[in-house]
Image: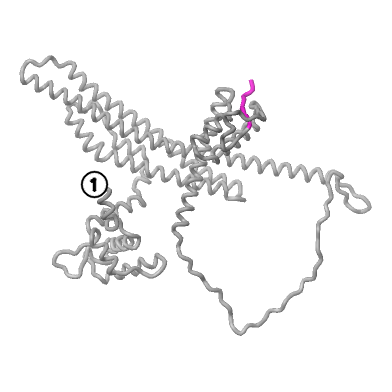
Amino acid sequence: MHNLTTTIAELYEQLVPSRDEALLVFRLHEKIRSGEIDASFSTQDIQRSIDETSRLGIGPGPNRERLLKNLLTYFVERPADQRNRYCLTEYARKFILLIDHKINNPFRKFPLRESFKRYTDFSAQDMRQINQFESWFNQGFQATTRENIFDHLEELKSDVKESILKLNKLLYSGEQPVLSMTAEFSQIFTDLGDKADEIRDTLRLGSSLLQEVEQVVLAFFRQTQEAKRPTTQEESKLFTDLTYAYTRSQEIQQEVKTFFDAVDDKLGQLREQIQFASNKLNELRDIFRFKSRFKINLKRLLESIVSETVTEKGELSLPVWIKRRTLIEERFKLTAMPDLDREYEVRNIALDLPDNSEHRRLELIKVETELIRQQRTAILVAAYKARLMRDGSLNFTEEFYKILEDEQDEEVAIQVAYELVQYVRDQANLKLIILPEIKEIYQSKPITTWTTNLQRLA
């Protein structure tokens, strides 16, 4: 069967350019836009652009004839009545705009709530006729609002992901000063807080729009109910128009609702990521607390040693509770070898290592997998804490195997168990009960654990 997938498989290499081909197209577009070359360029312009883009890669530059042959299908064409001249096709310009829009998205600097206000400005009282409602839906909502809102959400998701990566890097940065780390955390969370406010306002505006649309549908429904039974041809035509208006308004309402359901799903993903980021703030607080506790204990130790140290026969005698240990040593003689004069200077050979794109791709997958694992762990821990405080008890053995089954990731289950045990240990009103028994239903599981219950004290 010759379907779209088959056609794409046949034309893929011509429709989607390789790296060298895409860089050449972008370079030609930049030079045309800056006025460096004409819109109809020569083969010399192509060769110079190839030489410039080849400096960005590794290895020998691509062949001009091969690149030009591949691009002549969809990206480059010959102008009429101009020999040995070329120009970019409309498909090439759309491809450039697509990539440029993803990298330099104009919605990054424009708040989501403002875009929602602009594109969902709608009043049910203005929709007297069905053609007005259809005009708003087709020309305003479908043609503008849908794509602009989705573009906003994609850019907002990219910003949140970048913020989480910064938080991870900052949290595990090592010996960074506390004040500096706190200031950076504060700045990132201020940005995330603004994005959370945008999400909340967006949901509110979307709910208002749905209510307005529902008022329009009810107005058309009342018209059909108030219309009298048709007795003439003219009344029959009027009743048919009213029925069509009501049916069509219901269809528009369903499409608008479907759109906002998709928006709600995307906003739900963002809320989960922001919740994960808030858990990172708790980790930072724990790090500060542990560091502070260590410094206090170290200070107490030193104060105790100084206060209990006495002088005996002109020497300091440490407290008896400090055990003395003998350091193992070995005496040896250090012989310095004189520098030997060489007749020639030995230079290190610089190895030009090729770019291992497959290794980079696998490492990126590992990082992404670990981030998802951390997100799921944070969400599950928060949910179990809430259940424990609400219900007063939690059979974690049962929940442990449920996590293994749902997540298909033993690391998530183990990490959730570890964090919950740590949480219960630090809370005075919570109790951890572990019975050294393994129920029969769990004995065949790949991981076995003792019966563990968490309880809230009265």
- The quarter of the picture where the C terminus appears is top right
30 displayed left or right of 454: left
When the figure is inspected, residue 291 is found, relative to residue 341, above or below; the finding is above
Give coordinates of residue 39: x percent, y percent.
22, 63
142 vs 378, left or right, is left
Q: Is residue 367 positioned above or below 379 on the image?
A: below
> In the image, what residue type sits under mark 1?
Met
Residue placed farthest to the bottom in the image? 343
Q: Is residue 299 left or right of residue 78?
A: right
Name the one closer to the observer, 331 or 162.
331
Q: Which residue is mark 1?
A: 1
Question: Which residue occupies the foreground of this view, 20 or 178?
Answer: 20
Q: Secondary structure at mark 1?
A: loop
Q: Which residues are magenta?
A: 450-458
- Farthest left residue in view: 233
Q: Tell me which residue sits at (20%, 70%) in the image.
A: 84
